[in-house]
Amino acid sequence: MGVFGLQPGAVAQCRFVHKRLPFALGCYAALALLAWFTLGSAGFYVGGRLVQMRTAVCIFLGGLTLKTLIAYKAGW
């Protein structure tokens, strides 16, 4: 047991988690930018309506970003 009854590696793990969040968000942003500029007019139909691939990829990455932020706030 360390100071205040914590394990010695607990503080280091907390610092590591705080460095991982900006890295993950940066990766999501980079993937969204790459998808936006590389996927041109490609698309598919959903319910008789044309949806562009880059819009679908950005929505998907937005969902992953939201999941990451919720997990961060929950302390996972």
Image: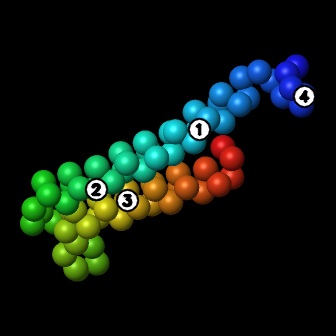
Closer to viewer: mark 2 or mark 4 = 4
User: Which residue is denoted by mark 4 in the rendering?
Assistant: 5
Where residue 8 sits, quadrant-wise, is top right
Closer to viewer: mark 3 or mark 4 = 4
Sequence-first tag of 1 and 4: 4
Sequence-first tag of 3 and 4: 4
Comparing 43 with 35, the one in front is: 35
Sequence-first tag of 1 and 2: 1
Q: CA distance from mark 1 to mark 4?
A: 20 Å
Sequence-first tag of 3 and 2: 2
Name the residue rendered at 43%, 42% in the picture.
Answer: 23
What's the residue type where badge 1 is placed? Answer: Val
C-beta proximity under 8 Å, tags 3 and 4: no
Q: CA distance from mark 1 to mark 3?
A: 23 Å
Q: Which mark is residue 17?
A: 1
Name the residue rendered at 85%, 21% in the picture.
Answer: 2
Q: CA distance from mark 3 to mark 4?
A: 42 Å
User: Which residue is denoted by mark 2 in the rendering?
Assistant: 32
What's the residue type where badge 4 is placed? Answer: Gly
Report the residue that reaches farthest toward the bottom: 48
Badge 3 density bin: few <14, some 14–19, many ≥20, Cα 10 Å? few
User: Which residue is denoted by mark 3 in the rendering?
Assistant: 60
C-beta proximity under 8 Å, tags 3 and 2: no
Badge 1 density bin: few <14, some 14–19, many ≥20, Cα 10 Å? few
What's the residue type where badge 3 is placed? Answer: Phe
